[in-house]
Amino acid sequence: MKKILIPLILLLVIATNSCGLYKDFERPDITFVDSLYNRIPTADDYESIASLTWKELFTDTLLQDWIEVGLKNNTDLEIARLKVEQAAITLKSSKLAFYPDVSFTAQANANANGLSYSLTPTASWELDIFGKLHNTKKGAQAGLASTEAFQQAVETQIIATIADSYYTLLMLDEQLDISKRTLKTWEENIRTLSALKRAGKTNEAAVLQAKANKVNVEASILTLEEQIIEQENSLSALLGLVPQELERGVLSEQIFPDTLLMGLPLSSLINRPDVRQAEYQLVEAYYATNVARSYFYPSITLSGNAGWSGTTGNIGDPGDWIFNAVGSLMQPIFNQGKNKARLKISESQQQEALLNFKQTLLDAGAEANNALVSWQTARKRLDSDKLQIMYLKGAVMNTQLLMKNGQADYLEVLTAQKNLLQAELTETNDKYIEIQSVITLYHALGGGRE
């Protein structure tokens, strides 16, 4: 029997390998990724913005402190960490499946001759000839890697959201400061126009128009102050803190790279946590399909027990030794189509995971392209904003002088000052968009690591 069993097992192993049950996962063809940056200048990996840590990109020390607080307190990140722990336990369990299953049985019965007993340790071991345990372990490894990537994705998103909220506060602070400065200008205009009215060089309509503009700026200040408090409350909740006033820097003092390089498409995008998670989900689905396929093959189990039995009434006999060993083979023949259904579902889920992986790469490429275009456009708008503000400041100064000399209408002064206020607010908003684009691009390229 032994001479027949060994060659049979060898043939089964060869057949299994030919069916690919032990074949490791291979990444599908994704060469299309190399054309995702076809309209954007790229660079080697070490020059890419994604190679920076978040502390190197966000140099504001106050922001760094708030990010540390957020990473410590955020509940979503803590949930992600727990998922990683769960996946690690699952992997450990799949590895233990390669070891024998050991149990211990003890029985005792009372009779006329005394107390009869038996003590029997039992062990069984499933031979992984057809790769069920191997593929289960590989799938668990991919599952752990997927949850780790998910944790990184959550962490990166938290960092980006905190940074974006922080810079929104700085933008609102800057706009509030501009509005307060403008309010002082309007107050000065009212005094000037009132003096000109008394001198007969203007009329009451000019004074009333200036007062109306002053009230409008005061209303804008109230709105900005409300938005600042709401933004502070929102950021406090993200940081896991009660609503409070948050210490922060100044928008004009924020420093970012003048040149943003993308890196090579495949190596930069594949570093994104969501892309890595999608790929690991594909790996997990691949090994799940192999597990489903292994159910069509026999299960071979070696089992045995050893122990002793005896009767307590027979003092001279400590008991008899018991030893038994057996090998069993279970081959599925008919199980109501469950194996076929399991395999078809697994194959369908694997194809779904493949499509999701490819689409995640495409979405990542589009996000990176859009972020860089937004950054480039914002920088060009900022150049235009600076020129416009310079011209408008000159226009305001000139119209004020002309009005004092009776050579310009008060409406020209009011219009120039309103245009200057709007240009300064627009410049602040464009500066925020520039910073926001840097954050988005950094996130899109898989940045955010320590």
Image (tube, rainbow, N blue to C red):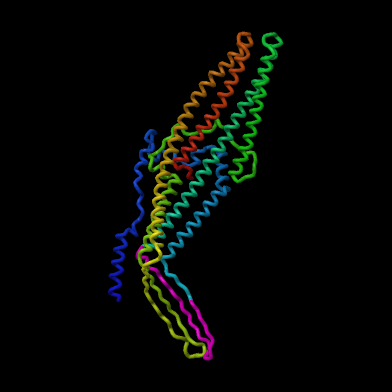
Q: Can residue 133 be seen in this view?
A: no
Q: Which residue lies furthest to the front in this view?
A: 336
Number of marks present in the image shown: 0
Q: Is residue 22 left or right of residue 62?
A: left
In this view of the protein, which residue sits in the foreground, 300 or 105? 300
Residue 420, position as x, y percentages in the image: 57, 21
The residue stretch that appears in magenta? 105-130
Q: Which residue lies furthest to the right in this view?
A: 198
Residue 437, position as x, y percentages in the image: 49, 35
What residue do we see at 44% from left, 70% from top?
A: 101
Give the quarter of the figure containing the N terminus. bottom left
252 is within the stretch colored magenta? no
109 is within the stretch colored magenta? yes
Q: In this view, does 186 lie above or below 85?
A: above
SS majority, magenta? strand
Residue 126, position as x, y percentages in the image: 39, 68
* Quadrant housing residue 302: bottom left
